[in-house]
Image: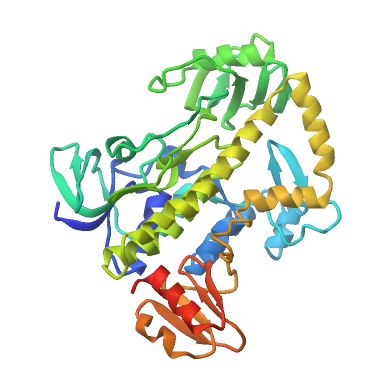
């Protein structure tokens, strides 16, 4: 493999989006993925994209295609009921979701009085379709497994399973929760051990089920039971240690099912088996020299709440333009230090909220009482709004003024100055576009966040130098 400027390890959504951002920034990255072909077990999985993620995708013209995917899937669902809705809002109403905005630990967040109309539930997309959309923008070299990382002061060498090597100026690990890059490059990964264990699979039962299909909160845990092809799930708390490398078997699922349900239910087969925990960990830094982490490689937590993919995509949006500027030599690598500074607190907040959801899932009498109290509180619109804005990433702010501007579209991946014409921006014309406007000026970063606002030319010049190089 030839030497490259940036090597992205991991061809999932986060790695693909990061690579697309790097290309917009003028860097042609290499993306390597150990799987020969996309993981079919995940291709039909629903993934919820939150409001801030959709705003980020809108910056690059990806929001429309994603919404079209969702609408097509919902229309197929509505067609099975004989409905013919006119638009997406009517479509949601026809499926009984007009007032549903989301949930927190399965406690529903409902718009009871119309005061949450500006908030929508996460947009559900099939992971396979979403990956194909992103892969249309970048190429992936599949069947290339990284087994070692050798980092020096001026370059990084990736060692592949077939014995070949590649040297890059920069390497980014987007290779998931069991990241080889994170381990080989010496990143730490502190956090908390699992407090719950979910077992999931499409299960064949020997006899008629003694419980109604659906979700059941029981003294032994949580049970979601259904005949095939709908998946079933058990959740038990304070689990014993288990071997992650061993495949979940029908016998193991049956034993868990009996403990949770209190019934002697017999399982004859299980397909698409998986275990899920609320193991929560976060690297204390997302950069060590010329090696960086993004997505699950930098942080893992329970999938309950659906924050993982969103957190990773927003990592990529924050890192892509910065790394492109540094890799092109127009900004110093000090710019990359702002990646950890800005994204670490966001990841820490998501881990905090994820741990809170895990605690609220418990089925002991004290937690059930707490869920009852919290359910009453969440009927108040402002309380529900707080949780919704947190889960949607709408309260993310970088620095004192770094709010997101949802009204711009930055299709070319460049920053934008919006304000009175000034010669101050001219030296950065290859990195910053100009949009004449009256009033105070605004400098919008490529990721949509505000970098500067005001009328002082010296302040604008300082912001341009800080974020976009000398």
Q: Position of residue 193 (x, y in %)?
A: 51, 25
Q: Position of residue 425 (x, y in %)?
A: 42, 84
- Indicate whether 216 appears above or below 147: above
* 264 sits left or right of 177 in the view: right
* 446 sits left or right of 54 in the view: left
Residue farthest top in this picture? 264
Look at the image and tell me in which quarter the C terminus lies.
Answer: bottom left
Camera-nearest residue between 21 and 152: 152
Q: Position of residue 445 (x, y in %)?
A: 47, 69
Q: Residue at x 35, y 38 (%)?
A: 187
- Indicate whether 299 appears above or below 133: above
Camera-nearest residue between 257 and 414: 414
Camera-nearest residue between 271 and 372: 372
Q: Position of residue 71 (x, y in %)?
A: 61, 58
The number of numbered badges drawn on the structure is 0
Q: Residue at x 79, y 36 (%)?
A: 374
Picture quarter containing residue 91? bottom right
Q: Residue at x 78, y 29 (%)?
A: 370
* 453 sits left or right of 357 in the view: left
Q: Is any atom of residue 246 visible in this view?
A: yes
Q: Is any atom of residue 17 visible in this view?
A: no
Q: Residue at x 50, y 16 (%)?
A: 250
Camera-nearest residue between 455 and 344: 455
């Amino acid at each position: 493999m030839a030497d490259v400027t940036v090597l992205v390890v991991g061809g999932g959504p986060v790695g693909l989006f990061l690579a697309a951002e790097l290309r917009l920034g003028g860097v042609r990255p290499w993306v390597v993925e150990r799987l020969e072909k996309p993981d079919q077990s995940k291709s039909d999985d629903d993934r919820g994209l939150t409001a801030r993620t959709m705003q980020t995708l809108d910056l690059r013209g990806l929001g429309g295609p994603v919404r079209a995917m969702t609408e097509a899937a919902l229309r197929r669902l509505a067609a099975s009921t004989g409905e013919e809705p006119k638009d997406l809002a009517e479509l949601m109403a026809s499926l009984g979701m007009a007032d549903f905005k989301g949930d927190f630990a399965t406690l529903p967040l409902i718009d009871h009085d119309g005061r949450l109309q500006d908030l929508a539930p996460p947009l559900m997309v099939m992971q396979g379709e979403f990956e194909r959309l992103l892969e249309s923008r970048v190429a992936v070299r599949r069947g290339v497994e990284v087994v070692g990382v050798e980092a020096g002061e001026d370059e990084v060498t990736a060692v592949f399973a077939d014995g070949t090597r590649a040297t890059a100026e920069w390497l980014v690990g987007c290779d998931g929760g069991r990241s080889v890059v994170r381990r080989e490059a010496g990143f730490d990964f502190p956090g908390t051990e699992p407090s719950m264990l979910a077992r999931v699979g499409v299960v064949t039962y020997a006899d008629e089920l003694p419980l109604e299909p659906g979700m059941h909160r029981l003294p032994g845990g949580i049970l979601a039971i259904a005949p095939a092809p709908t998946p079933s799930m058990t959740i038990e708390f304070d689990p014993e240690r288990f071997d992650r490398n061993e495949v979940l078997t029908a016998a193991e699922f049956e034993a868990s099912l009996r403990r949770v349900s209190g019934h002697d239910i017999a399982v004859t087969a299980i397909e698409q088996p998986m275990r899920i925990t609320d193991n929560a960990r976060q690297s204390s830094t997302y950069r060590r020299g010329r090696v960086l982490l993004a997505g699950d490689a930098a942080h893992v937590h329970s999938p309950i709440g659906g924050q993982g993919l969103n957190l990773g995509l927003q990592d990529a949006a924050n890192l892509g333009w910065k790394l492109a500027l540094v890799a092109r030599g127009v900004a110093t690598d000090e710019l990359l230090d702002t990646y950890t500074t800005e994204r670490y607190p966001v990841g820490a907040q998501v881990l905090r909220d994820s741990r809170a959801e895990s605690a609220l899932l418990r089925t002991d009498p004290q937690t059930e009482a707490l869920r009852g109290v919290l359910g009453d509180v969440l009927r108040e619109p402002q309380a529900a709004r707080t949780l919704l804005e947190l889960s949607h990433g709408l309260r993310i702010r970088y620095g004192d003024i770094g709010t997101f501007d949802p009204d711009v579209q930055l299709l070319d991946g460049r920053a934008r100055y919006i304000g009175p014409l000034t010669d101050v921006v001219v030296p950065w014309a290859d990195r910053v576009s100009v949009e004449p406007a009256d009033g105070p000026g605004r400098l919008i970063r490529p990721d949509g966040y505000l970098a500067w606002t005001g009328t002082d030319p010296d302040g604008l010049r300082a912001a341009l130098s800080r974020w976009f190089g000398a």
